[in-house]
Amino acid sequence: MDKKRGAINSITSIVLRVISVILNFFALRALVQMMGVDYQGFNTLFNSILGVLTIVEVGFAGAVGFCLYDPILAGDKEKIAAYYCYLKRIYLIIGVIVILTGAAVGIFLPYLANGATVTWDIYLAYFSYLLGSGGVYFFSYKGVLLNAYKENFKKDFASSGASIIQHILQIIFAYIFPNFLLFSSFTLVNLLIQFLLITVFSKEHKDVFKGNVSLSLVEKKELYKLVRGGLYHRITGIAANSLDTIIISSLISVTALGHYANYNTIATALVTVIGAGISATISVLGHAYRSQGKEALKRYFNITILGGFILFSVVYGGYAAASTPFVAMFYGEKYIESWPIVLAISCLGFIHLFAYLPAAFRDCSGLFKKDALVPILSLVVQIILKFSLVWNFGILGVVWSNVAVYACINIPGTTYYLYKNIFQSKFDKTCLLMLFMPFLFLAELAFILWITKYIQGSYTTLFFANGFIAVGIAGICSISFAFLGKDFRTFTLSTAKRLLKRN
């Protein structure tokens, strides 16, 4: 596996996302302080609506990216150009559909924003978000090509760099001229900067852009098999993320969504940052699978799953203990939520992030065309649970529905198909350990929240003290558990020995 390129992609993606996420926190803080929590609800609602509209993409990026691995390894420029030209035509159509569909959805904003008045400036703000989101498809096919060449860091630099500039402008103008329409219009600045950066970074592959080759009928059929499989997973992801906030906004209220978003934005940001690092390795893993075979991929899987469990436990254990002091310091004491909400959001963040790991190995190996039953079953159960529980349990019902479905259907189901179709081996210790990880993490969280409730002091003191204690507890528990895996244990000990010998 190209460890160097994988490290470059992951580190670049994580560092840029961290900067972007931090600035986004300050932009949302300015939004809440200068314009009110309802506008935080509108901001979250708009992003969720646009998240639902991404279903129009139906998975072409992942499918074409997977199909490009073999011709890139073989140096077949003609085949690469054929896939690139086909994706370019498809993405131009998708961009138009997204904008037109989003415009039609805008008519229903008063019904989706329960308890709020939708004025003309709210409509214009929504259309700024819409154009910023739909316009990306008119050039993002170049980003798909960069990913296939293992140059994810270039695409991430363009997208995150544009977001960083957007958030800086939002922070400055929110305090100088607090207007939600102006705040929203900076998404168009983001779009322009992304376009310029992607165009510059992709010039190296201009020989591919000049190609005018068509895919054969057989290649198109194979591509659409992959697209169909990717579509099922995309729909499930939308139901687990964007649909939640739409349900909360329309069935509870925009204000409740704003309060929930103060906590969930932090948890989602952690998923975004670390998930971006994981996603940046998919192309590297895909090349490794094509060149080294299933045995090497299985070993990477064993190490990654247990290493990921340690990282995610520490991150969301710390989040559970430190999020309430952070919200009190950052947004204001009046936005503090009760511990059941904190527990639920922490579990949701952990399970979403943990699901990235088997999904990365699924995508790099092309498995998504064979495990359609998993996302379909997940989608049906999610919808039933969410609309059943939201009436009696409110936000908690929506959040725990996601946790239950991911822990009991998505993660075990994807792992089953990986073992059956890709690794072609029987279930082993790593697989059994995976089934216990969500429940072990829940036990860790319960213990962390019980311990930290006895700590007293200012919010600053609680933030650092609770976080330190939580990270320590989660780290000890998760590392002890992870060392039960042979591949992870061998990899960790051999790496430590090499480092000690080098020192």
Image: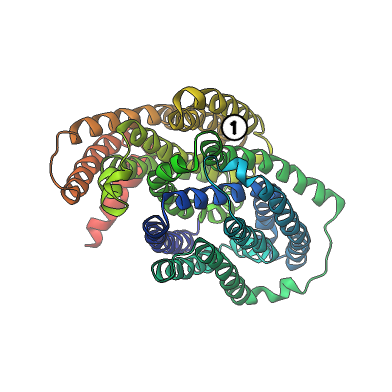
In front here: 160 or 302? Answer: 160
Toward the viewer: 209 or 345? 345
Q: Residue 154, how many percent across, how many down?
A: 54, 68
Numbered disc total = 1
Which residue is found at the position 56% from the left and 73% from the top?
A: 193
Q: Residues within 10 Å of mark 1 (few under 14, many from 20)?
A: some
The image position of residue 409, as x and y in percent, is: 54, 27
Residue under the point 45% across and 63% down: 4
- Left or right placement of residue 213 versus residue 52 in this view: right
Q: Residue 196: horizontal and vertical position, in percent?
A: 60, 75
Is residue 354 visible in the rendered structure shown here? Answer: yes
Examine the rendered structure and indicate whether residue 49 appears above or below residue 406. Answer: below
Quarter of the image that includes the C terminus? bottom left
Image point (66%, 52%), residue name? 66
Q: Secondary structure at mark 1?
A: helix
| Vertical arrangement, residue 394 with respect to residue 214, above or below | above
Could you say which is closer to the camera, residue 38 or residue 492? 38
Colouring scheme, one of rainbow, by chain, secondary structure, one colour = rainbow
**In the shown orientation, is residue 390 left or right of residue 503?**
right
Q: Nearer the viewer, residue 393 or 23?
A: 393
Q: Give the labeled residue for mark 1.
A: 417
Question: What amino acid is labelled 1 in the image?
Answer: Tyr
Query: In the visual, does 238 lie left or right of 35?
Result: right
Residue 190 position by quadrant: bottom right
Q: Which x, y percent locates residue 16?
A: 43, 64
